[in-house]
Image (cartoon, helix red, strand yellow):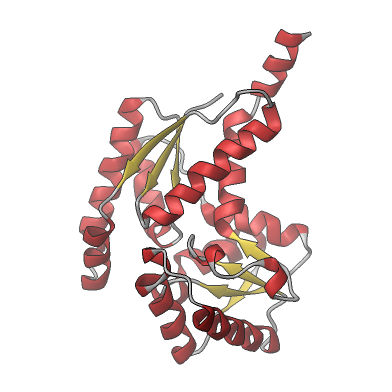
Amino acid sequence: MKTIGLIGGMSWESIAIYYRLMNEEVKRQLGGLHSAQLLLWSFDFAEIVSLQASGDWVEATKRMVEAGISLKKAGAEALVICTNTMHKMAADVESGSGLPVLYIADATAKAIKQKNLNTVGLLATRFTMEQDFYKGRLKEQQGINTIVPNDDGRAVVHQVIYEELCKGIIKDSSKDRYLKIIKKLVENGAEGIVLGCTEIGMLIKQEDVEVPLFDTTTLHAESAVGFALDGFKSIETKKSA
């Protein structure tokens, strides 16, 4: 089994979900007392948010690369950035650390195409919704078109993420606001909805909407386990034979 380095703490609520999902998936696939081989670097999220808000992406990238290098030195064989927004510097983390980064958008794109969808709505931080690093990769990898909420909708989605979900706060009123935004995206042509922030799955579930929902946290965690176990299950099978 390969050892995966998790770059998290952005927020800690989402890294806790990654840790649980990856261990559950390894146990599901291998059974018994198996669990995932993971190394974790967890940031003080307040420091990262400050860099995001000031637009100091150079310093944010430097810290992400340093985290990747530390995980490599500790024995990680690949990196999982446990947040959509910080995939903005994924290529720099990959080249700077010398480890492959398992892109969250790639796992999402694969799931979308399995549903034969061409256009999806994206809910995420303002950075992810407005910049091209995420939407562009969906288009580049699988030819998927992405639409986002209007200015007011983006403000609502962003505010709920940082002021509520990243603090572990779940409000029915915010869920209602999100569902209205989702409804508008569907009316504008979205065939499915991407929960493009790792905390949104805490608020919105598949049973809440009629179109396919793509929880990027779950998809990314499952994809990372697939990478970690590639070739391992066959070895385990031979041992038990």
Q: Is residue 76 above or below residue 191?
A: above
The quadrant holding residue 99 is top left
- How many numbered markers are drawn? 0
Where residue 111 sits, quadrant-wise, is bottom right
Give the percent coordinates (x, y) of residue 42: 32, 45
13 in relation to 174, above or below: above
Nearer-the-camera pick, 239 or 150: 239
| Depicted 71 relative to depicted 211: above or below | above
Q: Quadrant of residue 6?
A: top left
Residue 134 visible from this viewpoint: yes
Q: Residue at x 43, y 68 (%)?
A: 165
Point out the image quarter for the N terminus. Answer: top right
Q: Residue at x 57, y 44 (%)?
A: 21
Could you tell whether 58 is left or right of 109 in the image? Answer: left
Along the viewing direction, whichever of 16 and 3 lies nearer the viewer: 16
Instruction: Judge whether 4 appears above or below 183 on screen.
Output: above
Task: Answer left or right for 54 relative to 196.
Answer: left
At 64% from the left edge and 59% from the top edge, which residue is drawn?
109
Residue 226 in sight: no
Residue found at x 60% / y 61%: 215
Image quarter in which the C terminus is found: top right
In this orientation, which residue lies closer to the viewer: 240 or 135?
240
Q: Position of residue 43 (x, y in %)?
A: 28, 49
Q: Where residue 200 appears, x then y in whole percent?
A: 52, 67
Q: Position of residue 54 (x, y in %)?
A: 21, 71
